[in-house]
Amino acid sequence: MSARGTTILAARTTARPRVLRALRRAGLASLLALPVVVSTGCHETDPLESIHALQSQGEWLESASRLQALVEASPEDARLQLEYGKALLAVGEATRAIWPLRRATEDEGLAREAGVLLSMALLSSMNPDDAIAAASRVLELDPEAAEALFVRSRAYVAARREEDALNDADRYVELEPDDPQGRLLQLGILVMLEQLGEAEEAIAAAAPIFEDLADSKPEEAARFCVLEGVFAWEKGDREAGEQHLEGCLARFPEEPIAVIETVAAWDRAGEAEQATTIVRDALSRDPDRAEYRLMLAERLRAIGDDDEAEHVLREGTQRLEGPGPWLALHDFYVAIDDHAQAAEAMREALDRMSDPPAALRIAYADDLLLSGDLVAAEREAEQLPPPGVHLVRGRIHLARRDPAAARAALEEGLRLWPDNASARWLAGRAAEQMGDLPGAIAHYRESVRSDPARSPAAAELAEIYAAMGAGRDAIEFADRHLASHPEDPEAAALLLRLARRFDRTDASTRALAALAAMPGRKEPLRAEQAREQGSALAVAGSEDPAPRADADPSLESALIDAPRDPGVLLVLARALSAREPGSDRVVMLARSALMLGGGGEAGTLLGRTLVERGDFTAAIPVLQHAISSLPAPAIAQYWLGHAHESLGQMDAAREAYARSLEHPGLSAAERADATQRARAPLDDSRGRGPSAP
Amino acid sequence: MRRPVLLPHLIVAALMVAAFLATQMRLDGDSRPRGDLEDLAALAARDDLNVLFVLVDTLRADHLGAYGYARPTSPRIDALAETGIRFEDHLAQSSWTKTSMSSIWTSLYPQHVGVLRSTDVISPEADLPAETLRRAGFRTVGLWRNGWVAPNFGFGQGFESYVTPRPGRPPEGFRRENPGFRLVGNDFDIVTSFDELLRTSGDGRWFVYAHMMDVHQYATDEESALFGPTYLDAYDNAIHFTDRAVDALLDLLEARDLRDRTLVVLASDHGEAFGEHGFEGHARDLHAEVTRTPWILSLPFRLDPGIVIDAPSENVDVWPTVFDLLGIELDAPIDGRSLAPEIRTALARAGGAPEDAGPRAPHPPRTRIAHLDRHWARAEVAPLHAVALTTDRHRLFYYPGRTDLYDRERDPAERANLAERDPETAAALRQTVEDYLASEPVWSGGVPQVELDDMQLGQLRALGYVVEGGR
């Protein structure tokens, strides 16, 4: 039986999480990156000699390939297994390295070396328990095996056994006092354990070691310098921390870590202006360092100085080679919704790449499209491989008000790229504009499921469910939209509006709390109120449009503009019904109108169309529901009569025909037909098809 | 004196060899010899067998061709069934991976394992199949990508190596469901690890558990994106993609001439819902779409044709059956049972030896259990048990204060609740569930607990689960 896996990890206090976070950021995170040290110790066989020669030239991949063939031929050769495992580790194939290294540990003479490497491979494969076990086996053979202590300490950290990790780290530092990695490991664990006094001592003890690295490894020395400053600052001695960080900047002006961490410290202190000055200075010292330029542009954007941000990024395109600066400029223009400029920047970036990735080419076509240049967008789209070509084409069709073609193209693209939340949203819009509300809902729901933050699909659903009178669903999706767009005041305003409409004070509270967390951004609330008034006017203007069969093109166009207006849906459905009775499209439109509150009129049309299609069983409940909601349901009764008659339910049919005559609404021909059918003895023996007058 | 004539003898000999090979070889890359009841009986005596357990996460049976699905989602898995043993009426023990997998490994119903919540751990008292096989001399390796079977939940017991393969280069056009919560890598990383394991293992026996995750992730690539734009389509595409990964595992066995030395077991932990009962995904209820899973055994020899076991089976039966076939005795308490007798009977019939099979009798009545604590992610609140009790005739769903009853034969989709129409059956079956819920885990030391750390929570959220806690 295994004894592992039963540790009950006690909950720790988070009294000083900032210290931990700051120190982790400042360099202790680097401890998580496993340094793979691979020796090239020589083994006196010809093939291995040539392989070692390859390795000494850095040709690890080729050496791994040759070793693989040797292992294949001689799996019992432990030395080959060890060499193969080393080579796999060196090329980053840690999991694959496990198997040959484990075989190598079975050889007594290789157990120590292979065991350490196996432990490293296991740790890299997210298996700290086995990594601990492998290192422990090495330590049983040689309790002074420093590398095994080091890797086991790291494995204990991964297994959240910090006390054990510290014991090993302490022992490692005793054995290897001059190794900076060991010092950092020890320090990191002390901070995790919140033993800050001991951490301070460890910093002091390690300082001379890192001091010695200032020339040979300035990055490591700078990292440690910053760590000392952050430690002092976060411990509460801000002045000492500030001075220390300034000192680090002065000593290591070329090391980005010194700039980045000093900036982060000032930001944490709430002094963004000072932080920006440091970045600006760093950039002026080293104007070719892209990361400073990006940092500065981002900071300028954050304070609303878009002009200066643009200037900084554009200057980067003049100073620096390659596509990177142009991509940064592109992203900036996208962020400020200037897609024409974004397209130009992306074109420049693409021109600087020999084989640009499809994602960037899609982005370029998208920029062209959003800037209104549909012809150029289409030209680009045709050059794209699937699914890009389909997705961009779909968006172009949508912009050209051809929802059916848009939907077909988008759905073809989604077959290959089902997790594209934006494309799902667009497919939903296309479906809505075709009058297919259930299809639209399906796409919107799947967009939300894919990635609610990447599309407004949750907001669309909230609006649709609200239009359908489904308050609970409407609030649920408005909530989800706000959760995935927490910085968007429009999202909070939507929730607030729906909460008021459906009398949900809990949702109002959530919306107001979210808005309150967005200081100075209350305008959307007022905009929302204005929109509500506008919507009311729009709805009033679209009431009761007359059904005219010759108005299809304009009605289709009206549907694209107002896909959630049941009046528009109903008028279009009636027009189509006159021309294509019983068609799929009429069913789709009438059903959508019914879902959106089209009431008895929509139900009557849907029921009638179902009868015309021969789906009598489905038609009956739809018509009965329509009858219950209409004051004068003559037409619904008339078609209910047909449905019953067709199913051979003659008594019910006669009754429905008779009731249809009690109300106005039937045409003269329908009235005559209903009169005849209500009185005449119907053939009770079998159903018969409907015969519309 | 008659002159010796060589040619006719050569022709006859060649024809004999060809005829022999035709019985021993398959044309489509399956080199296993054809086998029969005798070969099945001989399995227990063989000392050269390996075991490959392929667990395809989130695989519903009714989306596989072998189980009657119209779409060609799974040609390779179907081929396994066509030349092996398929269990037609098979159920998983839960719709949540952790509970379901703990039942597969222990052959105990969830209440008896006690692993029902995010913090529960399989007891170290359990003697898991990997431990049994390791004692029997197998090299034991687990390749997993689902955080709910992580070693700190007790699932690594008995495995010499229990690892998540590092992600390699994904196939061209690789896509998966949720860009916001990505589980890194894909199932071909498992194939790569398996390849390395075989390369370096030599001749020793091994047991490999390959837990495939790409159906769960709705992963696909251009080659497998066959069926359309909806999420149900994407799910089918993912089955096709995973089917190729399974095929790649089998190809590795073929390439090393190990197919006739390997018993392949394919099963799943749960299915997936697409709104049939109001939910999408899994781990929310226990209806057929999330609990009817496949179970296929592919022996080290071909059955021609394959056989279908229609006796009721469930995931707790998987290891008792495998061990029975391998001649390994189990002495731990289990809820499952070996289906080996049914296999022998079916094979005897298929081989035209009804006298060996005995009279064809209806299988004995059986009651099967699936269980989900709907509060599995909320360790601080009381359990909210949902239990599905399946008899030959009915399926009862137990919820606190509510009972649903369905007729399995007339209503396999579980639409028409008969609980009010047939209160006596409902009450009797509900009592059975209550007795089950009153029972305790079998471990004397209770169910260990573990606190989820941030990294693990991150991994689990990457699977799309909303899990509370962390530190």
Image (cartoon, helix red, strand yellow):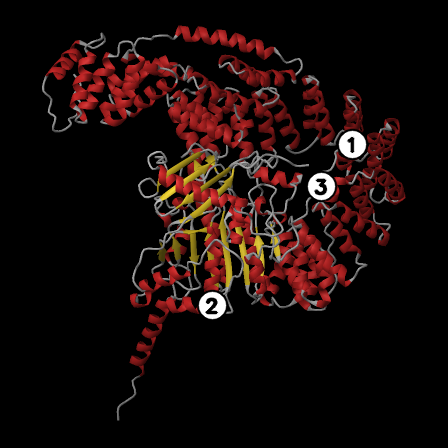
Instruction: Tell me the chain of label 1.
Output: A
Q: Measured from the top left, where is residue B221 in percent x and y? A: 48, 42
Residue under label 3: A10
Mark 2 vs 1: CB contact within 8 A: no
Q: Amino acid at mark 2?
A: Ala
Horizontal arrangement in the rendering, residue A158 relative to residue A479 (left or right): right
The residue at 63%/14% (across/down) is A521
Q: Is residue B196 visible?
A: no
Mark 2 vs 3: CB contact within 8 A: no
Residue A261 got which mark?
1
The residue at 60%/62% (across/down) is B200
Under circle 1, the secondary element is: helix
Question: Disc 2 and disc 3: Cα gap in Å?
Answer: 47 Å
Comparing B395 with B314, the one in front is B395
Residue B44 got which mark?
2
Q: Which of the two discs, 2 and 1, sits closer to the camera?
A: 2
